[in-house]
Image: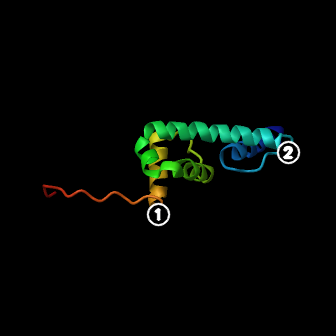
Amino acid sequence: MTARAELAARQRELVRALLAGGPAPDGFDAHRVDVEARSLRSTRRSIAARLRPDLVEALGDRFRPLFDAWAIDHPKPVGSSFRTDLERFEAWLYAGGHLEPPRARRRWFRT
């Protein structure tokens, strides 16, 4: 393996540890990696709460643990917006039965 490929592999391991709950790579302090991973999740959760206060209100005390569990298994895709990320979170909440899907509105017109 070339030095460049080895560096890329180590970087992927570190990103996996920081964003997807993976183990700390060899040579990294596991505690510090965990602290940073929790900090990154907290930042992502804070942005989610600002953008979707309705989800925070609907979930109450369950928002934090549910968001964190989802965030570990669903890292934000590169290039996606936070709003798109939150649409994925909302769909996950409905699929898992954590929230009742909104009832379809009756339309007063026909399409």
Q: Mark 1 or 2 closer to N-term?
A: 2
Towards the viewer: 59 or 77: 59
Q: Position of residue 70 (x, y in %)?
A: 57, 53
Q: Quadrant of residue 34?
A: top right
Q: Residue furthest front?
A: 61
x%, y% of residue 30? 81, 43
Q: Give the x, y percent position of residue 90.
A: 45, 52
Whether residue 30 is visible to the viewer of this picture, yes or no, is: yes
Q: Residue at x 54, y 37 (%)?
A: 46
Residue at image coords 49%, 45%: 85
Residue type at mark 1? Gly
Amino acid at the residue labelled 2: Asp
Q: Could you say which is closer to the camera, residue 62 or residue 37?
A: 62
The residue mark sitting in front, 1 or 2, is 1
Please state if 65 lies on the left or on the right of 16 as rendered. left
Residue lying at 43% horizontally and 46% vertically, measured from the top left: 57
Query: What residue sits 59% from the left and 36% below the top?
Result: 43
With 31 as the anchor, is 104 left or right in this view? left
- Left or right placement of residue 52 versus residue 79 in this view: left
Above or below, 94 relative to 68: below
Colour scheme employed for the rendering of this structure: rainbow
Q: Which mark is residue 67?
A: none
Residue behind mark 1:
97
Question: Is residue 104 shown left or right of residue 48?
Answer: left
Residue 11 seen from this side: no
Q: Mark 2 = which residue? A: 26
